[in-house]
Image (tube, rainbow, N blue to C red):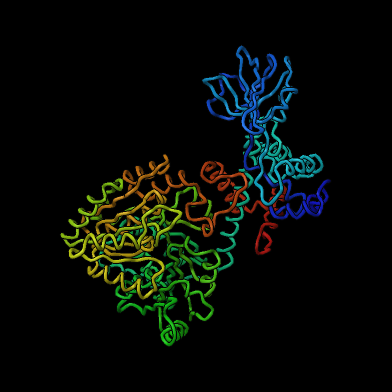
Amino acid sequence: MLNEPITAIKGVGDKLQQELELINIFTVEDLLFYFPNRYDSYEVKPIRELLHEEKVTIEGEVIGEPTVTFYGRKRSRLVVNLQVEHHVVKGIMFNRPFAKKQLRPGDVVTLTGKWDQHRLQITVSNYKKGKAKSQDQIQPIYPLKGSITNKQIVKLMKAAVSQYAFSIEEILPDDYLTSYKLPNRSDALCQIHFPTSFNHLKHAKRRFIYEEFLLFQLKMQWIRKRTKEATVGNSLNYNEERVNQFIDKLPFSLTNAQTKALTEILDDMKSAYRMNRLLQGDVGSGKTAVAAICLFASITCGKQGALMVPTEILAEQHYESLKNMFEGYGRVGLLTGSIKGKARKEIVTKIQSHEVDIVIGTHALIQDEVNFFDLGLVIVDEQHRFGVNQRKALREKGMHPDVLFMTATPIPRTLAISTFGDMDVSIIDEMPEGRKEIETYWVKENMLDRVLQFIEKEVKQGYQAYVICPLIEESEKLDIQNAVDLFHQLSHYFKGKLGVGLMHGRLRSEEKEEVMQEFAANRIQVLVSTTVVEVGVNVPNATVMVVYDAERFGLSQLHQLRGRVGRGSAQSYCILIADPKGEVGKERMRIMTETTNGFELSEQDLQLRGPGDFFGRKQSGLPEFKVADVVHDYRALETARRDAWTVIQDDLLKLPPFEKLRDLLEEMDDEGDTLD
């Protein structure tokens, strides 16, 4: 019944059907589950509860005849006085002179508009004769596209709800409804479209928030279980003695957090199931060292390892450091988009014939021409920068290789359990010994001279500086500093004193490499750059990070940039040049100067920016929830995750109370598998 075409609703012709299809409404069910994204309130409140300059609704009796004043061309102002409680309230209406005949002394009317508390006055946007009906006090507002109007959607929804709401079947077990005091699915659906009170609306939302989270978490937990059970026989029996020798030869000791994460990863590699783990660690916490040890472990059992990174600069940097680390232990190869012709054929052949043990590369690793001899471990660095399909393609290069995702963007717990519900998570939350905390300052642009003098002072002591800009070239739309202009400005300022370099995403790979080599060798002392240096570039001699127009960046990105300095033993500094106009921008700068812990910052960033902007919506892998919000509804998310884990672990989906949930999950399953 619910899968009938939308034309089954009276009033839906060909034109309206096309408009509805633009917003993905094809069936009656699609319409019923097309939820409002906000509500206009027409609830009548006592005058003492009305807030100045807020949209309000009042109810009262007309006193005397309304007056109309005409001015300009066809413009008018109507004033009507109302007795509201013990007050006389003035209603102002613009360009509606006809209302004078409709509003008679003694009439009871309901006015909605902007409230002026000081003048006891309302600027009217809507009015109607009579008292406000309770069912009209909360009006749903739907997200729209094309020429369809909210009024049309409301009309269709009323018809659909009255005709089909009784067909909505409950999918949650009765125990859940009772335990969490949730309304049934049909009642909740009626209330979410046409709430009879704010309390009923709140409970309807609670119901769908929990339902959305539970379905998502059940799917995640099911994928997690299926992945583990479907890939028996992937045990990497690495040589523990050789791995320990490799660790002992490292020029540093592992922190307790690194050791704990390493143990978790190596246990996964040894298990019969395929690893699907996320390694989180703050900038500079030593994830690469852990990755290198794991790659070596895969070599000791005759397998190959692959490390995929988002940029060529980072790939080349990892290649150099791992080549040195693996000298005498294994053969390391590099494959990026700029390796072409004979050199490319050579490395591709070596990968296929196992003349290379470890391959470091960009997305070039997932091209069809690249075939591994026996890929045992895949490590994806800065995993959120790769789309889901790219990650999947690399996983499928081997015979079910173990997969480790790494990120230096500390992901808040609330987001991690939502986005990575199908993964195990390891965290490195401890910094290597001897790391000094980076001092962070927020200054206005009028202090630029002092900032440049400070850079010069640091360079005289043998150190280097980054200066970061949001744009490459001048933009007419945004009045913000750009890298090319700033490069010329600083080249002029420091002429004859120190070398200034320029780096941005539009340079060819060879040019970027050349600039980075010049900077790493200290032939360039000040590097002007866009955020291309945000991830992974390692120059221990750099001690100053200056970020122009810092309010344009999120906290997590600013923290990533700050992490480019402080990689040596010297004291390092981060200077944020910003003049934020809004409170959020000011708050962001304040938090940056007070907090250096990436996980704390990420929680604050999530609160300020919301989950959609945290990674960038396109590649975040975040599910699109209709009602639920992973930040504000995190308690419901935790509850749903706990319940989903129990259902999957105890195999409850086969029991009658979970039958409807099981059916819905099988419909949702992309791969069409049954949940057996």
Left-right relation of 195 to 87: right
Q: Residue furthest left?
A: 461
**Residue at 58%, 56% in the rendered image:** 220
In which quarter of the view is residue 456 placed?
bottom left
In which quarter of the view is residue 331 placed?
bottom left
Left-right relation of 232 to 262: right
Q: Is residue 540 visible?
A: no
Residue 542 percent coordinates (x, y): 25, 61
**Residue at 22%, 56% in the rendered image:** 455
**Residue at 64%, 54% in the rendered image:** 651
Residue 318 percent coordinates (x, y): 35, 70
Q: Is residue 406 visible?
A: yes
Left-right relation of 540 to 667: left
Front position in the image: 310 or 180: 310
Residue 146 percent coordinates (x, y): 68, 52
Q: Quadrant of the C terminus?
A: bottom right
Looking at the rendered structure, the number of numbered marks drawn on it comes to: 0
Left-right relation of 158 to 544: right
Front position in the image: 62 or 248: 62
The relative height of residue 155 versus residue 487 in the rendered view (above or below) is above
The relative height of residue 561 versus residue 338 in the rendered view (above or below) is above
Q: Residue furthest bottom?
A: 342
Residue 245 percent coordinates (x, y): 30, 71
In which quarter of the view is residue 539 placed?
bottom left
